[in-house]
Image (cartoon, rainbow, N blue to C red):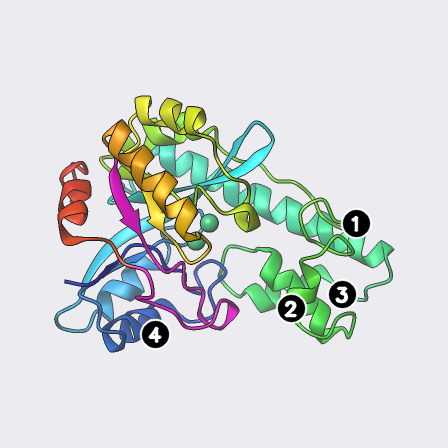
Amino acid sequence: MRIDLHSHSTASDGTDPPAEVMRRARTAGLDVIALTDHDTLAGHDEARRALPPGLTLVPGIELSCRLGGHSVHLLAYHVDPAQAELAEELHAMTTDRLRRAREMVGKLRELGVDITWEQVAAIAGGAVVGRPHLARAMVAAGAIGSPEQAFTADWIGAGGRAYVDRYGLDPERAIRLVSSAGGVSVLAHPGSPQRGWVIGDEAVERLARAGLGGLEVAHPDHDEAERLRLARLAGALGLAVSGGSDDHGLLTGHRLGCETIAPGEYERLMSLAARA
Ligand SMILES: [Zn+2]
Ligand SMILES: [Zn+2]
């Protein structure tokens, strides 16, 4: 069994629609794929309808959290979309993403980049607006040559001239919300400085006490030393050893299935989700 528990579609900042992600998952030889768009469950219906025979979809989400001023991502699987408190939080996060994107457009305009909010919204389509959409508008305006160039201190990289912080959930609260919505949570890329920061053992211990189900050990950003540290930590804290490709389509290069989770760990993780 080949299982990839981390992927993105056009419902957030991936470049392929959910149906295409499902098709690619099967082509990549996967038996199980989790769709984990940022702060939205919107891609699941399309993914379900397009599910090729032999492929199992794990409905997921990647929640934006903040811990001590740092960005932390929490993967959650099998949450009940009707759970009121979680639905309210997701709504608040979407509203805040809009505010943030508008503010970044304003800052970019002050820096002489000729883009408008309408252009960015059109690029995002129905997706949750994020920095990749701004980056594409910047390319279209000729301010930069390729989207990656936007993610620097000059522009909208973390702490950059046109960067604006956004609201994030407290991760301990997020873990409790996920549990009360019948789901199970996994700390995403805990050892990736590119995607936030390297989370120390003590912080992970606190999250484990709050009900965290697993650690994402296998992630493309993790080197061997980091995988070793995280696998040991997962063992010591009784957490499942999880993993996934974090595929964003063209944005990361098509890489579904490049990281997988062991079937036993997958079963253990799913047994923690009441709704699985
Ligand atoms: Zn992430
Ligand atoms: Zn991700």
Compute the Cα span from label 1 to label 3. Answer: 16 Å
**Can you identify the residue that label 3 sits on?**
115
Dot 1: few (<14), some (14–19), or many (≥20) neighbours within 10 Å?
some
- Whether 236 is among the magenta residues is no
Q: Earlier in the sequence, mark 1 or mark 3?
A: 3
Q: Quadrant of the N terminus?
A: bottom left
Q: Where's residue 104, x and y in %?
A: 72, 51
Q: Earlier in the sequence, mark 4 or mark 2?
A: 4
Q: Is residue 269 left or right of residue 189?
A: left
Q: Is residue 260 left or right of residue 267?
A: right
Are dots 2 and 1 in contact, CB under 8 Å?
no
Are dots 1 and 3 in contact, CB under 8 Å?
no
Q: Which mark is residue 161?
A: 1
Dot 2: few (<14), some (14–19), or many (≥20) neighbours within 10 Å?
some
Q: Earlier in the sequence, mark 2 or mark 3?
A: 3
The kind of secondary structure element at disc 2 is: helix
Type of amino acid under label 4: Glu
**Can you identify the residue that label 4 sits on?**
20
Compute the Cα span from label 1 to label 4. Answer: 35 Å
**Can you identify the residue that label 2 sits on?**
147
Place residue 215 in its image quadrant: top left
Compute the Cα span from label 4 to label 2. Answer: 22 Å
